[in-house]
Image (spheres, grey):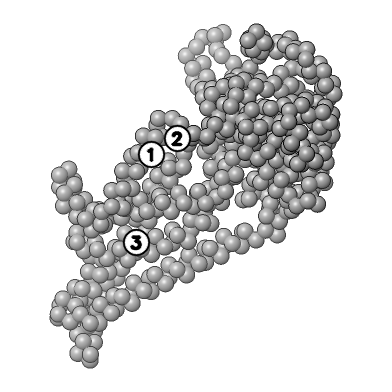
């Protein structure tokens, strides 16, 4: 154990391993945050298409497209999607792209599929009478949605969305498949130097744990804020 | 058939009041000269949910100022009829004429007409994320704003087009009317006036969750009134209320009736129907089984089915 610590210390401090780790941490957070932002945008659009009234042709076509989209991104592993994007699609289109950008886009597209379901269930958890009352007053579907239903659905959506963010942060550990140095790869590099992995991998787990705990605290804070505005007195 | 053609002709012309059926002589309210103008004409309305045909051909003329009570056993289609009138449920076939347009036609902009057809729900359906005042102001403000924005758009394109027109050939711009601040102020003062009328102005800034059922329902009625509707549809407005709160809601509806509002009320309150309605419909099995003036309806029911129903509920 002592030897393990010493080797880790040398690698981490003397050979500037901490720099790799900090950069990796930044990459991990970057991919997760931007992935979530893209995911929320895509997810919201898909969820709205799903709850739209389907009398006309256009919503039906859009709905079909969304179904295929969600089916693909939920039906295949994230790693496979990363590999396809990085090694198949981009070379085929002749676009040079760095791994981080590809990872952000793929994570965004992938989480969009999951977020759409979160949003849809959040919107549908609002009593149907709310939309009906809005429509009965002569508001359009979209106005009633934006002014009445969506504000009420946010309270239901936020906790699950936080969950999705946590999943996303941990899922980023697969980006080393496309040669991106994230947190996981940085710690593995430290271990690789001496083929001594005990401390690096335990540290790696600890860093992820701290990240997730921070996010959990953040979500809880936001939830409490929402509840405060809900105190109906 | 000839009468149906009459209705068509009457509704398709400006001078709809020319149409008089001459049969209805029990209208007490709505002393205006429009009192026997057909406001809503329901023709051969059918509605199915899957294989279940709930409405099997309804014909109904609702005249200005009429107060129609619809009663009947549960599952007979009374709520569905009411919800079909403003197309909350899309009719399977048939038509609903309101102001000369067929609401069942998908090409008609239903939102414009719904603004003039108030609806009150069994479950109140106040917007939970808005205060009482915002609940009442929302629709009038949003709709006035939209109209203003539309005119603004028209003016924008017109002013561009006018650049290329000769001086005496230019199209005038549409007057925008009130500013958004004025629209809001007006809606707010109207909402306060309505709230004062029902004695709930002190609740203007409260959220619906803090109100009692009776208060919620009265506010829901006032919210519909803020749109200045021509007709009000009530879908069992007192069925979800505690017994001691039924009275306050019925009182408000009675005041409304006295003011000459045209009303269609699906209700289980027989006493109220008898007192306020000008015409009572008995629905059974998806058709209007019997209709009459309230007095005759309750004292001399014709069909055995209605006799049986009344003996159970009275």
Task: Classify mark 3: residues with Cα within 10 Å, few (<14), some (14-19) or many (20+).
Answer: many
The answer to whether the residues at label 2 and label 1 have Cβ atoms under 8 Å apart is yes
Q: Chain of mark 1?
A: A
Which disc, if any, is residue A177?
A: none
Depth check: give the residue in front, B121 or B273: B273
- Measured in 3D between alpha carbons, the distance from the residue under mark 3 to the one under mark 2, in whole angstroms, is 32 Å
Q: Are marks 2 and 1 on the same chain?
A: yes
Depth check: give the residue in front, A105 or A153: A153
Which disc, if any, is residue A63?
A: 1
In this view, which residue lies farthest toward the bottom?
Answer: A2
State the image quarter where residue A57 is shown. Answer: top left
Name the residue rendered at 47%, 70% in the picture: A217
x, y percentage for residue A150?
53, 48
Earlier sequence position, callout 3 versus callout 1: 1
Q: Say which residue label 2 marks.
A: A54
Q: Say which residue label 3 marks.
A: A168
């Amino acid at each position: 154990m002592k030897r393990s610590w010493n080797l880790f210390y040398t690698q981490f401090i003397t050979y500037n391993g901490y720099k790799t780790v900090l950069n990796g941490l930044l990459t991990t957070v970057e991919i997760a945050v931007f992935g979530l932002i893209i995911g929320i945008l895509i997810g919201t659009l898909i969820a709205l298409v799903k709850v739209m009234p389907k009398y006309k042709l256009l919503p039906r076509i859009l709905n079909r497209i969304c179904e295929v989209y969600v089916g693909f991104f939920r039906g295949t592993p994230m790693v496979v999607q990363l590999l396809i994007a990085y090694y198949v699609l981009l070379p085929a289109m002749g676009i040079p792209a760095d791994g981080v950008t590809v990872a952000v886009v793929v994570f965004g597209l992938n989480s969009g599929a999951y977020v759409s379901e979160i949003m849809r269930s959040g919107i549908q958890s609002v009593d149907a009478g709310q939309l009906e009352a809005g429509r009965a007053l002569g508001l359009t579907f979209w106005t009633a949605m934006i002014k009445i239903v969506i504000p009420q659905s946010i309270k239901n959506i936020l906790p699950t969305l936080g969950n999705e963010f946590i999943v996303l942060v941990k899922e980023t550990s697969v980006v080393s498949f496309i040669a991106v140095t994230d947190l996981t790869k940085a710690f593995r590099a430290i271990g690789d130097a001496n083929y001594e992995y005990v401390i690096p991998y335990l540290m790696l787990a600890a860093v992820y744990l701290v990240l997730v705990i921070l996010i959990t605290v953040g979500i809880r804070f936001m939830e409490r804020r929402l509840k405060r505005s809900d105190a109906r007195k | 058939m000839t009468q149906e053609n009459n209705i068509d002709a009457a509704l398709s012309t400006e001078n709809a009041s020319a149409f008089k059926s001459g049969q209805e002589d029990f209208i007490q309210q709505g002393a205006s000269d429009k009192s026997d103008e057909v406001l809503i004409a329901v023709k051969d309305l059918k509605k199915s949910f899957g294989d279940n045909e709930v409405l099997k051909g309804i014909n109904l003329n609702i005249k200005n100022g009429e107060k129609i009570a619809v009663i009947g056993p549960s599952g007979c289609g009374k709520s569905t009829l009411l919800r079909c009138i403003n197309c909350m449920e899309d009719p399977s076939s048939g038509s609903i004429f309101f102001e000369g347009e067929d609401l069942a036609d998908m090409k008609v902009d239903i939102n414009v007409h719904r603004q003039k057809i108030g609806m009150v729900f069994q479950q109140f359906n106040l917007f939970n994320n808005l205060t009482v005042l915002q609940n009442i102001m929302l629709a009038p403000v949003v709709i006035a704003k939209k109209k203003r924005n539309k005119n603004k758009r028209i003016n924008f394109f017109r002013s561009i087009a006018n650049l290329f027109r000769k001086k005496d050939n230019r199209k005038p711009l549409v007057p925008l009317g009130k500013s958004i601040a004025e629209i809001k102020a007006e809606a707010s003062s109207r909402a306060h006036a309505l709230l004062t009328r029902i004695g709930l102005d002190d609740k203007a800034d409260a959220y619906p969750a803090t109100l009692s059922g009776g208060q919620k329902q009265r506010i829901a009625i006032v919210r519909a009134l803020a749109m200045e509707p021509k007709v009000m549809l009530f879908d069992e407005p007192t069925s979800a209320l505690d017994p001691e709160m039924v009275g306050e809601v019925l009182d408000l509806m009675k005041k409304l009736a006295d003011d000459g509002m045209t009303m269609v009320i699906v209700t289980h309150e027989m006493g109220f129907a008898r007192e306020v309605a000008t015409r009572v419909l008995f629905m059974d099995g998806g058709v209007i089984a019997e209709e009459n003036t309230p007095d005759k309806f309750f004292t001399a029911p014709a069909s055995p089915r209605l006799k049986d129903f009344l003996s159970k509920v009275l």
